[in-house]
Amino acid sequence: MAKRIDVNDVNIYYGKFHAVSDVTLSVPPKHVTAFIGPSGCGKSTVLRTLNRMHEVIPGARVEGKVLLDGENIYAPSVDPVQVRRTIGMVFQSPNPFPTMSIKDNVLAGLKLGGEKNRQRLDEIAEHALRGANLWNEVKDRLNKPGGGLSGGQQQRLCIARAIAVQPDVLLMDEPCSALDPISTLAIEDLISDLKQDYTIVIVTHNMQQAARVSDQTGFFNVPGVGESGRLVEINDTEKIFSNPDEQATEDYISGRFG
Ligand SMILES: Nc1ncnc2c1ncn2[C@@H]1O[C@H](COP(=O)(O)OP(=O)(O)OP(=O)(O)O)[C@@H](O)[C@H]1O
């Protein structure tokens, strides 16, 4: 079930480096939210705090609250592994297990969770592969290695793996940056389909992509080298790209910097 995320006054550190300052934003369910901004402004860092992936980096820490339908995912009683199941992530380069079969790749997260019923696993694999728009291309070779698929197919396999565990939210960190234009369009179409069921947050370098796929867009910026990144503005995508509130957003989207 798609859920809402509220980020309240979040500050993010790598050791002593204060990488991102004072981020407050809301991500509505069944919408696509895009994060854009110049390199190093903290887009991926903020994305990783939304499912506690940030914590796997030694020395990294977060202050503030991230609420999933009102529950703070950083509360001491919350298990970060469970958070990462509920809030799934798709990475920049497709990262299937290359020698593992296509089906087992899709089911990797579920099997870790202990599900053993074969018929149930087959149904879930088909459902996830259909959801990721890959079923027709792979249904006759489910037992062949995931590494044998094209880059775009591998990325859709990773999306199938992420949705197989039935998350509430999908985070995508530049999911198309390693893909050709046709595979990119396939993933963008898929994102538009997936938002019927999921809350989606995507980091992208490609402003046209943000304009094409997202409902709201957050623009991040960093004032200078070694300074903290900040969220300059978050608004409806149409507004960000036509009439943003902040001059810095206007300058960025019109190509004056970054
Ligand atoms: N593992 C890390 N250790 C230390 N500093 C890091 C680490 N990862 C990122 N940073 C720093 O945090 C800041 C934000 O980085 P981040 O990768 O979030 O930016 P970004 O906007 O996603 O950049 P890009 O568009 O280039 O991917 C940068 O100054 C970066 O050097």
Image: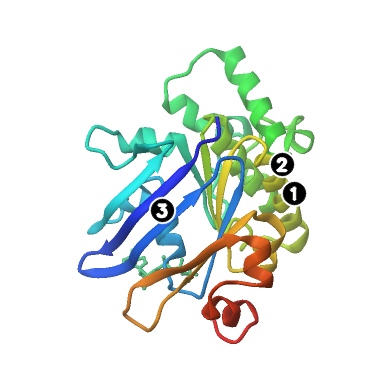
Residue type at numbered disc 1: Asp
Quadrant in which the C terminus is drawn: bottom right
Q: Which residue is mark 2?
A: 193
Query: Cβ(mark 3) to ligand 1 < 8 Å?
Result: yes
The answer to whether the residues at label 2 and label 1 have Cβ atoms under 8 Å apart is yes
Q: Earlier in the sequence, mark 2 or mark 3?
A: 3
Q: Observer-nearest residue: 184 or 111?
A: 184
Between 8 and 156, the one lying in front of the other is 8
Seen at 20% across and 69% down, the residue is: 16
Q: Secondary structure at mark 1?
A: helix
Marks 2/3: CA distance?
A: 23 Å
Relative to 117, residue 40 above or below: below
Residue 80 vertical position relative to residue 62 in the rendered view, above or below: above
Ligand 1's quadrant:
bottom left
Q: Is residue 44 left or right of residue 63?
A: right
- Under mark 3, the amino acid is Arg
